[in-house]
Image (tube, rainbow, N blue to C red):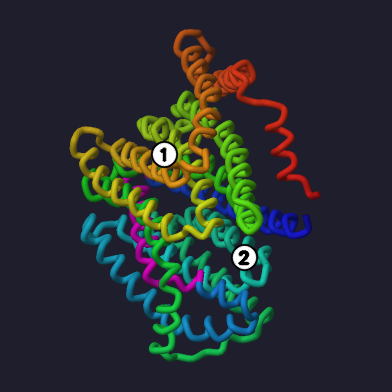
């Protein structure tokens, strides 16, 4: 149990840092949207998306490679960081300039371009900070990596508030993002020097390119993941007005928080799947089925409640003028059970050394998203088009994962598992549609939660052995 406890603690540290960071980022976004409106929020969101894509070509798989090599030898991190950063810093500046040109081409030279530039540069600098903290992860100093992940997003809040109090506009306020990640980056270098020694600086582009080539295998899946998460917003930005993009961005931001919960769960379970893969594939299958059951029992009711209370959620967090975003949030809600089950099956495939197969499956999802998204937008779905495209892509990708594992019996087991929570969800929808519930507001949301819980109990969705299994996973020993 010692290894399992250590893995759980390390995963918990990452999860806590990510949760705090996401909450801080969400507060900053809501604060920014309320102050400057949907048009400026659209520039912020598109800048983040373009920056995330450009950051791939700064990282180039180096974070995964440095993590692996540093785990094999503690001193390797100093050489790798010292060789890669002299290449990646100027590369980051070049790509940031390209990003600003892309922003000008998308929306012209306007006040919102400064917001676009700050958001784009922020994503690029975050990738460099990730490289600096890769050796910390490799040597299981997860606390520092988690602290860094939360710190640059937490720092942006007081810096942005100070900018607003000083009378700054959206451009200078968004520049607080750049300043916050810059502080963390410099602090990370100082901490690196203290923990590992100074990087062995070597400005050798040829050597750096050779290192990046060796790490190119880490790049494929990351590129697909980033394209998948950002493509819908970028396509919508090219085909729709800034206000429409801003409304979509609100729903896209809201769904991040509930989406973190299943991701954390899969991160906790994945090391156990990897360990069991060396012992018995039957045990891997049994664990996957039990975890899939818990994920479905959590995400199907969550998707139901988000769908029924989407208007209240949007109005409470962003204000009444962003109300149309509720329609997108209702579609996004049903990506939770699909994506979480797909992530769990992907973790099993990785544990069984079927990573190449997983890359092909992810490529299928990305291809479907890229083709269907503009078609849906232009055919009348409007700003709901990217959400529907994501749902279609997740469904097909999940179907592909299930097909790969059909001989294990996992698809049949998960199909049986989801029947009871789907029945509970249908009963909750029926009651919400036919019975008068006080609201809208907190009272209505609480009543719907109680109805959902009762429906789960009556349908037999929740059983005693599910709770005992969850307790066993989370116990310290």
Residue 431 shows up from this direction: yes
The residue at the point 50 percent across, 67 percent down is 179
Residue 50 in picture, x, y percent from top left: 34, 59
The residue at the point 33 percent across, 50 percent down is 364
Relative to residue 367, is residue 21 drawn left or right? right
User: Callout 1: helix, strand or loop?
Assistant: helix
The residue at the point 35 percent across, 56 percent down is 227
Residue 44 shows up from this direction: no
Location of residue 320 (image quadrant): top left
Relative to residue 464, is residue 228 drawn left or right? left
Q: Mark 2 to mark 1: distance in Å?
A: 29 Å
Decide which of 350, 264 is in the foreground and name it: 350
Residue 371 in picture, x, y percent from top left: 24, 47
Marking on residue 251: 1
The secondary structure making up most of the magenta span is helix
Is 59 contained in the magenta span? yes
Which residue is the extreme one toward the left? 379
Residue 203 in picture, x, y percent from top left: 44, 90
> Which stretch did the figure color magenta?
37-64
Where 386 falls versus 55 (above or below)?
above
Decide which of 112, 294 is in the foreground and name it: 294
Asked if the residue at tag 1 contacts the one at tag 2, i.e. Cβ–Cβ closer than 8 Å, the answer is no
The residue at the point 35 percent across, 66 percent down is 54
Where 180 falls versus 11 (above or below)?
below
Residue 242 in picture, x, y percent from top left: 28, 46
Residue for badge 2: 145
Decide which of 19, 151 is in the foreground and name it: 19
């Amino acid at each position: 149990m010692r290894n399992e406890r250590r893995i759980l603690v390390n995963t918990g540290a990452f999860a806590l840092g990510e949760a705090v960071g996401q909450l801080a980022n969400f507060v900053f976004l809501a604060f920014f949207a309320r102050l400057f409106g949907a048009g400026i929020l659209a520039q912020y969101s598109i800048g983040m998306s373009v920056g995330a894509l450009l950051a791939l070509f700064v990282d180039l798989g180096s974070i995964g490679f440095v993590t692996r090599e540093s785990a094999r030898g503690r001193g390797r991190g100093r050489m790798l960081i010292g060789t890669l950063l002299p290449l990646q810093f100027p590369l980051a500046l070049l790509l940031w300039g390209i990003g600003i040109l892309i922003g000008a081409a998308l929306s012209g030279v306007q006040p919102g371009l400064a917001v676009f530039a700050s958001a784009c540069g922020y994503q690029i600098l975050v990738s460099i900070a990730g490289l600096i903290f890769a050796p910390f992860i490799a040597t299981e100093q997860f606390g520092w990596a988690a602290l860094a992940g939360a710190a640059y997003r937490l720092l942006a809040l007081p810096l942005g508030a100070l900018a607003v109090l000083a009378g700054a506009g959206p451009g200078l306020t968004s520049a607080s993002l750049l300043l916050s990640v810059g502080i963390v980056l410099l602090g990370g270098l100082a901490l690196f020097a203290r923990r590992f020694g100074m990087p062995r600086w070597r400005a050798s582009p040829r050597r750096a390119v050779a290192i990046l080539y060796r790490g190119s295998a880490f790049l494929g899946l990351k590129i697909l993941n980033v394209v998948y998460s950002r493509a819908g917003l970028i396509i919508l930005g090219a085909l729709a007005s800034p206000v429409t993009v801003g409304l979509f961005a609100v729903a896209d931001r809201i769904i991040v928080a509930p989406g973190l919960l299943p991701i954390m769960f899969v991160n906790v379970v994945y090391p156990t799947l990897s360990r069991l893969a060396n012992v018995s594939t039957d045990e891997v299958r049994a664990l996957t089925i039990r975890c899939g059951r818990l994920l479905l029992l959590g995400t199907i009711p969550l998707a139901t409640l988000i769908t029924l209370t989407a208007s209240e959620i949007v109005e409470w967090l962003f204000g009444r003028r962003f109300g149309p975003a509720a329609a997108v949030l209702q579609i996004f809600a049903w990506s939770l059970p699909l994506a979480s089950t797909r992530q769990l099956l992907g973790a099993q495939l990785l544990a069984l050394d079927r990573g190449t197969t997983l890359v092909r499956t992810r490529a299928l999802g990305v291809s479907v998203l890229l083709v269907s998204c503009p078609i849906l937008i232009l055919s009348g779905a409007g700003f709901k088009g990217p959400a529907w495209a994501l749902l279609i892509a997740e469904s097909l990708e999940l179907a592909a994962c299930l097909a790969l594992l059909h001989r294990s019996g996992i698809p049949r087991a998960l199909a049986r598992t989801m029947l009871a929570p789907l029945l509970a969800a249908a009963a909750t929808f029926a009651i919400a549609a036919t019975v008068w519930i006080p609201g809208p507001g907190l009272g209505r949301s609480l009543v719907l939660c109680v109805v959902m819980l009762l429906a789960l109990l009556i349908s037999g969705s929740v059983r005693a052995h599910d709770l005992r299994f969850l307790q066993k996973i989370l116990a310290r020993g």
